[in-house]
Image (cartoon, rainbow, N blue to C red):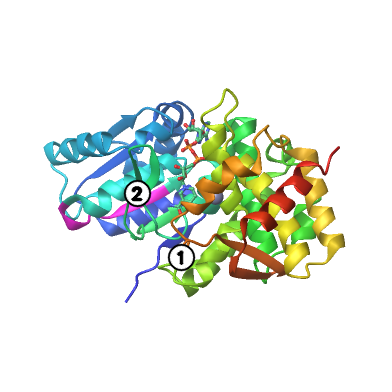
Amino acid sequence: MHREAVILETREQLDQFISHRGYSSIFILVDEHTHTHCLSSLQNSCLSLRDVEIIEVEPGEQSKDIAIAAQLWEALIQLGADRNSCLLNLGGGVITDLGGFIASTLKRGMPFIHVPTSLLAMVDAAIGGKTGINIAGIKNQAGTFAEPEAILIDSSWLRSLPNRESLSGFSEMLKHAIISAGGRPEAMLEIDPHTFIRDTPGSTLQALVRDSAHLKEVVVRQDREEQNLRKALNFGHTTGHALEAVAATTKNPLTHGEAVALGMIVALELSKATCELDPGFCTQVQNYLLQHYPSFPEIDAAALWPYMLADKKNKDGEVRFVLLAAPGRPVIDAVVDKETFSTAYDASKNLLT
Ligand SMILES: NC(=O)c1ccc[n+]([C@@H]2O[C@H](COP(=O)([O-])OP(=O)(O)OC[C@H]3O[C@@H](n4cnc5c(N)ncnc54)[C@H](O)[C@@H]3O)[C@@H](O)[C@H]2O)c1
Ligand SMILES: [Zn+2]
C-alpha cells in the first residue's frame, strides 16, 4: 500500500507533526539562499527544529550530483542518522529532489519531510514523490519514487523569491490549470505572474498555491508511477525540455518554467492543428504567455528535434507529445512527426511578428 504524504499548511502544524513522530534525530538540508532567507524563520516557528544539524549545499542545479549525494550520505552516517531519523528538505526543487534522493536511499530509506520554498517546488517538485539527481549533465537519470512523510505548503516563503523564479513556477501553475478537469485557466490568465507574489494578500496567495499543488496531487494519485495519466503533467515539456537544453549551451539560458511556457505555446498550436482545440482558447493562452514570458530564442526546429527524439518518454523512435482536446482534457502519447512539429514551431515563433 502506498503511504501518502500529509500536506500541512502552517508551521505550527509542522512543529506538532514532528514532535508527534518522535524522530531519533533531525537534519535540515538547505542551500545557501534558503539558509539565508528561510532557516532562522523556520527554526523560530518550530521548537522541534531549534537544536538540529544543518547541512548546506551550493545553490543551483549542479548540486543534484552523485558526488554531492555521496558527501551527504557520508555526513549523515557520521552524524549518526538512522532509520528513525528525519531529513527535512528546506529549499527549491533542487533541495527536494536531492534530499529526497539521499534520504530514500540511505539505509534503504529514512523518513524525510519537504518544506518547499520556491513556487516551482511548492506546486510541482515537492509533490508526487519523485526524487532525482543528474548524471553526466543529463537530468534526473538516477532517482526513486519515494514519498515524504509530510509536505509543508507555506507560501509566505515566496516573498524573498527572485522574480525570475516566480515566473518559472507560475508557468507550471498555469499548466496544472489547463490540463486538469478541476482547473480554472481563466482565473489564472487574470494574474500578472511578475507581481502576484508581491501584490496578492497572504491568504489568497496561500489558496492559489495550495490549490495548484492539489491539482498535481490529484493527477499523481491516479498514476503514481507514470504509466499513463501522470504523463499529462508533461504538457509543454516536450518542446520545453529541448529549448531548455539548447538554450543552456548559449549565452542566454532559459529557466525551466520559461522554457515550459514557450513549449506550451507550441503544444497549443499543435493541439489546434491536430486535436480540434478551440482556436479562441488557444490564442488567449498563447497571447498571455507571449505577453509575460521571454520570446523564443533564435533556435530553429531542426536543432530541437534530436533533443525531442531523446526524450525518455518516447517509444519506438517516435516523438510523443501531450496535447489538449479542450481545457481539462489532455491527450497523452500524441505522436507528432518532424514536419508537423516544424510547422507548429515556426507558426508559434512568428506569433508576435
Ligand atoms: N521531482 C519532481 O517531480 C520535479 C518536478 C519539477 C521540477 N523538479 C526539479 O526541481 C528543480 C527546479 O526547482 P527550482 O526552480 O525550485 O530550483 P532551485 O531549487 O534551484 O531554486 C531556484 C533558486 O531559488 C532559490 N530559492 C528557493 N527558495 C527561495 C526563497 N524562498 N527565497 C529566496 N531564494 C530562494 C534557490 O536557492 C535557487 O537559487 C529542477 O532540478 C527540477 O528537475 C522536480
Ligand atoms: Zn516542469
Picture residue at 57% right of the left edge, 48% below the top: 305
Q: Is residue 332 left or right of residue 51?
A: right
Which x, y percent locates residue 23?
23, 53
Do the residues under discs 1 and 2 have CB atoms within 8 angstroms? no
Which x, y percent locates residue 317?
47, 61
User: Is 154 drawn above or below residue 159 in the view shown?
Assistant: below
- What's the amino acid at mark 2? Gln
Q: On residue 141, which mark appears? A: 2
Q: Is residue 291 left or right of residue 43?
A: right
Mark 2 beta carbon near ligand 1 (under 8 Å)? no
- What's the amino acid at mark 1? Lys
Q: Is residue 185 left or right of residue 45?
A: right
| Quarter of the view holding residue 21 | bottom left
In depth, the one of 3 and 232 nearer the eye is: 232
Q: Specify the segment rendered in magenta.
A: 107-114
> Does 108 appear in magenta?
yes
Dot 1 corresponds to which residue? 315
Q: CA–CA distance between discs 1 and 2? A: 17 Å
Q: Nearer the viewer, mark 1 or mark 2?
A: 1
Q: Secondary structure at mark 2?
A: strand
Which x, y percent locates residue 161?
58, 33
Picture residue at 42% right of the left edge, 29% below the top: 59
Location of the C terminus (image quadrant): top right
Picture residue at 46% right of the left edge, 28% below the top: 33
